[in-house]
Amino acid sequence: MALSLAIVSAPGWTEPRTREGADVDKTSNGAVASAELETLMERYQQADPEATKELVDRLSPMLLRFLAGPMQTRDQAEDMLQDCWMRIHRARHTYRPGAPLLPWVFAIARHARVDAYRKRSQITRRELISEDLRQLAPRASIRPRPIMPTCGNWFKNCLKVSRTW
């Protein structure tokens, strides 16, 4: 049984446009755009500043949309984007020329997003714990037990025993 799909645009739908108002690349399956990105990445690996600027300009909007989510503010998403570009820059030598670029880039972005989430949740947990301790501190009169004198006495006894041998 053959399956056929028809792509129909919704009424009132317009072609996507970039922030500057220029038309987005309209290619079949994105193959040409993907090949251009791979070429830009190869030039970026060779420290071409023009390729670097073009690559950042083309990938940053996609990465920002990927990194921005319901739990992040715009500032958090931009921080993650900057971290993502630092990771891409550090790992640029691991990109294999001719391999698809977008899966490689989005894997790095996914790791940056997960790490940022973990960092934020860890900070939140620490803040909650410190707030709980502040609330408990006035009520509790907990005094730490002296551990060192006990250990010191044990150590002194060990020395006495070893001297008798």
Image (spheres, helix red, strand yellow):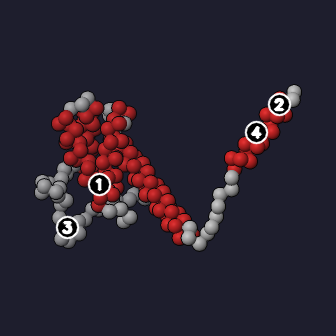
Q: CA distance from mark 3 to mark 4?
A: 81 Å
- In the figure, is residue 56 to the left or right of 2? left
Please identify the residue farthest to the top as the structure is shown: 165
Structural crowding at the residue carrying mark 3, measured as other residues with C-alpha within 10 Å and reported as few (<14), some (14–19) or many (≥20): few
SS at mark 2?
Answer: helix
Label 4 crowding class (10 Å Cα cut-off): few <14, some 14-19, many 20+?
Answer: few
Q: What number is the disc on residue 33? A: none
- Mark 1 and 2 residues: CB-CB less than 8 Å, in contact? no
**Mark in the foreground, 1 or 2:** 2
| Residues tagged 3 and 4 counted as in contact (Cβ below 8 A) | no
Mark earlier in primary sequence (2, 4): 4
- Disc 3 versus disc 4: nearer the observer: 4
Quadrant for the N terminus, please: bottom left
Between discs 3 and 4, the one toward the N terminus: 3
Residue annotated with mark 1: 78
Q: Residue at x 31, y 50 (%)?
A: 81
Residue sitting at 13 percent across and 55 percent down? 20
Q: Amino acid at mark 2?
A: Ser
Ranked by sequence position, the earlier of labels 1 and 2 is 1
Tag 3 residue? 13
Instruction: Return the residue nearer the eye: 100 or 136.
Output: 136
Residue shown at 38% from the left, 45% from the top: 108
Work out how far the residue at label 1 is from the one at label 2, CA to CA, in angstroms.
Answer: 64 Å
* Residue 143 figure quarter: bottom right
Residue in the foreground of this view, choosing between 111 and 26? 111
Residue beneath disc 4: 155
Can residue 79 be spotted in the picture? Answer: yes
Q: Amino acid at mark 1?
A: Glu
Counting residues from the N terminus, which is met first, the one under dot 1 or under dot 4?
1
* In the image, farthest residue toward the right: 165
Residue beneath disc 2: 162
Spatial CA distance of label 1 from label 4 is 56 Å
